[in-house]
């Protein structure tokens, strides 16, 4: 996709619509349910080559919110006959994000570390009218860095000090109850 007329801050003109950029990439996805009974797995990969010259970007660069490589592997065990459950684990990966380091050379020349998370979930078909869902994200508590905040002025040594941008809560837990009222059922086992 090509981008035209993006807002661009120019020193003497203020904001103009002369910004530009592009984004191109590939998505790959594979899902297999036939390997072992009750098991299935999914593998996904995305490559994204993106450049923008907009806002305060003086040259075309990869924006701070774009990751070039993203991948995930998910394994799911489903057994409604005995356990009436579906259990899954997912590993996610993203390459580092670019950021501007005022201590370095070049614009947006820094790169954060890679991001990794491992998530688990458990769906329980407790009753025809009740589904219980449990999930936990980033179960190993990895501290992923999404960028850096730099001080606006350098210290006595001429260095701009920084603090990493982290999630306030690196792990999340969710418990959900889905209850169907009335004559309908909450699920049909054949739909899972």
Image: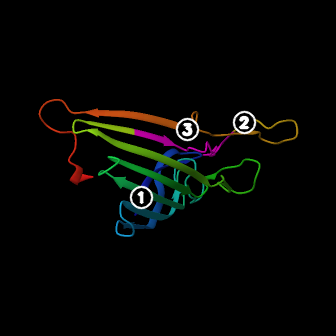
Q: SS for tag 3?
A: loop
Mark 3 or 2, closer to the camera? 3
Q: CA distance from mark 1 to mark 2?
A: 33 Å
| Residue 73, position as x, y percentages in the image | 48, 60
Mark 1 or 3, closer to the camera? 3
**Mark 1 and 3 residues: CB-CB less than 8 Å, in contact?**
no
Q: SS for tag 1?
A: strand
| Residue 161, position as x, y percentages in the image | 77, 39
Q: Earlier in the sequence, mark 3 or mark 2?
A: 2
The question of residue 171 being in magenta is answered with: no
**Mark 3 and 2 residues: CB-CB less than 8 Å, in contact?**
no
| Residue 122, position as x, y percentages in the image | 41, 44
User: Is 38 rendered above or below residue 140?
Assistant: below
For the residue pair 178 and 97, the one nearer the viewer reads as: 178
Instruction: Give the numbered dot on residue 69.
Output: none
Q: CA distance from mark 3 to mark 2?
A: 28 Å
The question of residue 141 being in magenta is answered with: yes
Q: Extreme front residue here?
A: 82
For the residue pair 164 and 80, the one nearer the viewer reads as: 80
Q: Earlier in the sequence, mark 1 or mark 2?
A: 1
For image coordinates 76% across by 53% down, the residue present is: 104
For the residue pair 69 and 156, the one nearer the viewer reads as: 69
Q: Earlier in the sequence, mark 1 or mark 3?
A: 1
Q: Quadrant of residue 43?
A: bottom left
**Residue 61 appears left or right of 47:** right
**Residue 5 appears left or right of 149:** left
Instruction: Give the numbered dot on residue 4.
Output: 1
Query: For mark 3, what is the residue?
Result: 171
What are the residue bounds of the magenta stretch?
A: 134-149
Query: For mark 2, what is the residue?
Result: 151
| Residue 85, position as x, y percentages in the image | 35, 47
**Residue 133 appears left or right of 116:** left
């Amino acid at each position: 996709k090509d981008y035209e007329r993006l807002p661009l801050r120019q020193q003497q003109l203020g904001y103009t619509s002369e910004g530009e950029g592009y984004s191109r990439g590939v998505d790959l996805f594979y899902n297999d349910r036939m390997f072992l009974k009750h098991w299935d797995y999914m593998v996904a990969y995305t490559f994204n080559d993106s450049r923008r010259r907009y806002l305060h970007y003086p040259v075309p660069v990869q924006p701070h919110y774009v990751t070039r490589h993203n991948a995930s592997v998910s394994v799911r065990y489903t057994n409604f006959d005995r356990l009436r459950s579906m259990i899954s684990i997912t590993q996610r990966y993203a390459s580092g994000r670019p950021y501007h380091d005022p201590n370095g050379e070049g614009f947006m020349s820094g790169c954060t570390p890679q991001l990794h998370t491992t998530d688990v979930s458990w769906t329980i078909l407790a009753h025809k009218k009740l589904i219980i869902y449990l999930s936990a994200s980033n179960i190993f508590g990895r501290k992923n860095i999404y960028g850096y905040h730099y001080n606006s002025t350098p210290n006595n040594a001429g260095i701009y000090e920084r603090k990493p941008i982290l999630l306030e809560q690196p792990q999340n837990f969710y418990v959900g109850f889905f209850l169907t009222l009335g004559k309908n059922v909450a699920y049909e086992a054949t739909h899972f």
